[in-house]
């Protein structure tokens, strides 16, 4: 999907939200690796990312051309500072009304409103694509993310006490959240 919007951040700076393009492959991959080194609240480790730049470019081209999936980037002063994705749960009749959401932002840019703006953009695109429900899983204790999701209208529908197993923290409970669109 295609998307573009300029938003004003809490510190007064401008932030451009737009769908990632093939040309963004190298920078997107770099930001993905950076953010996955900064937190234990994501579902993969930086050293598990096996995509190379060419594969990332192809991935981004497919997302930009897709009618129902979005890979969104946030740019501040021309630099990619965050990524968010809205992806289909599946194409089969019984599940094609559902999409899932994921997000990661460079720690230097937390607390400026970028996460909320990206989430809002993805919710709008999910509605436009015809989904009826947006879903996600968040690690218990990730208070910023949980507050952001609740503020946007997500509700908890279950918990998995062993949803993730961190290399350093052991089992992490995950909270399943959903939002009707
Ligand atoms: C979670 C994340 C995307 C939030 O992005 P962000 O740009 O920092 O979020 P925002 O600045 O829009 O703030 C979101 C809300 O969190 C709330 N918040 C911020 N810090 C908080 C805290 N310590 N406790 C409770 N709520 C908090 C605020 O209410 C804010 O909403 P407001 O602006 O209406 O007051 C970002 O911290 C991140 O990338 N974290 C690492 C990866 C991750 O955890 N991803 C989510 C996986 S499910």
Image (spheres, rainbow, N blue to C red):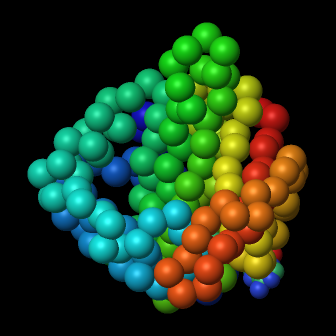
Of 84 and 128, the residue lying toward us:
84
Indicate the quadrant of ligand 1 in the picture: bottom right
Residue 29 image position (x, y, % from top left): 27, 65
Classify 64 as above or below 39: above
Q: Is residue 67 above or below residue 124?
A: above
Given residues 118 and 56, the one toward you in this image is 56
Vertical relation: 72 (above or below) 12: above
| Image-quadrant location for residue 171 | bottom right
Looking at the image, the residue that sits furthest to the left is 54
Q: Where is residue 49 in the image (x, y as percent from the top left)?
A: 30, 64
Which residue is pictured at 55% across the width and 15% down the height? 92
Q: Is residue 35 left or right of residue 141?
A: left
Residue at 55%, 77% in the rendered image: 166
Q: Can residue 148 be seen in this view?
A: no
Q: What residue appears at the point 38 percent right and 28 percent down from the top-left corner?
A: 66
* Residue 102 quadrant: bottom right
Residue at screen point 42% across, 38% down: 2
Query: Furthest residue to the top?
Result: 93
Image coords of residue 9 (percent x, y)? 61, 75
Percent from the top left, x then y, of residue 149? 77, 59
Residue 48 at least partly seen: yes
């Amino acid at each position: 999907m295609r998307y573009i919007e300029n938003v004003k951040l809490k510190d007064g700076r401008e932030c451009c939200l737009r769908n990632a393009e093939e040309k963004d492959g190298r920078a997107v991959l770099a930001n993905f690796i950076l953010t996955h080194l900064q937190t234990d609240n994501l579902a993969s480790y930086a050293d598990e990312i096996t995509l190379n730049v060419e594969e990332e470019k192809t991935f981004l081209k497919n997302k930009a051309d897709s009618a129902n999936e979005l890979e969104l980037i946030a740019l501040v002063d021309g630099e990619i500072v965050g990524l968010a994705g809205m992806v289909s749960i599946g194409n089969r009749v019984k599940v094609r009304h559902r999409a899932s959401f994921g997000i990661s932002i460079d720690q230097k840019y937390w607390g400026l409103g970028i996460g909320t703006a990206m989430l809002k953009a993805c919710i709008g695109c999910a509605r436009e694509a015809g989904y009826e429900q947006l879903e996600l899983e968040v690690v218990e204790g990730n208070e910023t993310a949980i507050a952001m999701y609740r503020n946007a209208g997500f509700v908890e529908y279950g918990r998995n006490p062993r949803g993730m197993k961190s290399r350093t923290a052991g089992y992490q409970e995950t909270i399943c959240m959903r939002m009707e669109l």
